[in-house]
Image: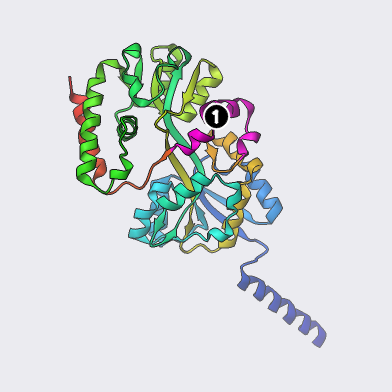
Amino acid sequence: MALRKTRISALATLLAATTASGNLLAEELRLITWGGYAPDEVVAQFEEETGIDVKITLSNNEDMISKLRATGGAGFDLAQPSQDRIVGVQRQFNIYKPIDYSRINTGQLQASMVKATQESTALDGQSYGVPSVWGTSGLIVHSSVADTVTDYTDLCDPAVAGKVSYRLRRPTLIGFAFAMGMDPFAAYEDRDEYQSILAKVEDKLIDCKDNVKTYWTGGDQLLSLLRTGEVTAAMAWDAGGWKLNAENPDIRFVAPESGALGWIDTFAIPRRSENEEAAYKWINFVMQPEIAAKITNASGNFTASKGADEFVNAELRDAYRLSFDEEAINNIKWYPPVPPGLEAMEGQVLDRVQAAN
């Protein structure tokens, strides 16, 4: 009996120590992410290799912020907000913890994306994000006008008059500014300079109105216009261009000469994460090229994983390579966080362009 009690006591001590270290048999990673970013086959492989159960909550930027704000950064072990939605939120609500980059296998990540993410998520000398999935807006062109339309402002060329479409949204302002030789991102902190840039872009967009078939407002609308040939050149997202390219090789997505405009969805660790170790394991696991390719196949967007395009579905891989070589990737203009008040300024410009005759 005494021996049995000793064994039971030893087992209890072992279980207590295991619990204290966080290495429970039912270890869990609670991930809040976007649709397509955690495909079932990827989750299953991670669970099999690590023994960690993954609980997925599908979300978007606003919902992630709302949930983490309500709990003070609790309830999830890993989140995937966009890079320009971290610093302002962190400054105001303190819902994330700094990334320990010594625990990230940066050798398997695109260096330019790591740099862009570290800079755009930096606060008080620390970075709060790791690059994950990315995408761009640029140009979708038909081969018949590919030599004419190589940058945003070429949408105003008389050769494509009446066959052009773009949105009256802030990416159009930003893209035209870069194509006109200005750097709007560098002027974010100088309201007067930014207003000067917007004024020049406004004049250009008003002059360009006669070229525009329609200002598209939805992705399906734009794809239809390009499929029918009513539009032969447009400013739009890369994924839409690659989708059209699979249907018609004469249509493709082009990275503009002044640089595609890029967004990055990140990995960020909530401040009250209960399994930080599992979060880092997931980041390093899914950014392996062969695993990252499965995320691209599921979501249609590429990842920051270096060399992952080698393992992507052939049609998507070929369309991507046609759009982006290393130079084009390094020339992407990554969106930084938007200072308060800038979007209101931009909105006034867009309203005036819309109303102009």
- Tell me, yes or no, if residue 347 can be seen here: no
The chosen color scheme is rainbow
Query: Which kind of residue does numbered mark 1 sit on?
Result: Tyr
Q: Residue furthest bottom?
A: 2
Q: Is residue 321 magenta?
A: yes
In the shown orientation, is residue 259 left or right of residue 347?
A: right
Determine whether the residue tagged by mark 1 lies in a helix, strand or loop. helix
Residue at 19% in and 29% down: 352
On screen, residue 146 above or below 236 = above
Q: Is residue 314 magenta?
A: yes
Q: Dot 1, how many residues are within 10 Å of its Cα: few (below 14), some (14-19), or many (20+)?
A: many
The dominant secondary structure in magenta is helix
- Tag count: 1
Residue 351 x/y as whole percent: 21, 30
Residue at 60% in and 58% down: 278
Residue at 57% in and 46% down: 109
For this rendering, which residue is in front, 279 or 233?
Answer: 233
On screen, residue 82 above or below 205 = below
Residue 154 x/y as whole percent: 35, 21
For this rendering, which residue is in front, 143 or 347?
Answer: 143
Q: Which residue is mark 1?
A: 320
Q: Quadrant of residue 1?
A: bottom right
- Tell me, yes or no, if residue 330 can be seen here: yes
Q: Quadrant of residue 345?
A: top left
Residue 16 x/y as whole percent: 65, 75
Residue at 35% in and 12% down: 159
Residue 70 x/y as whole percent: 38, 58
Q: Could you tell me which quadrant the C terminus lies in? A: top left
Q: Which residues are magenta?
A: 307-332
On screen, residue 224 above or below 268 = above
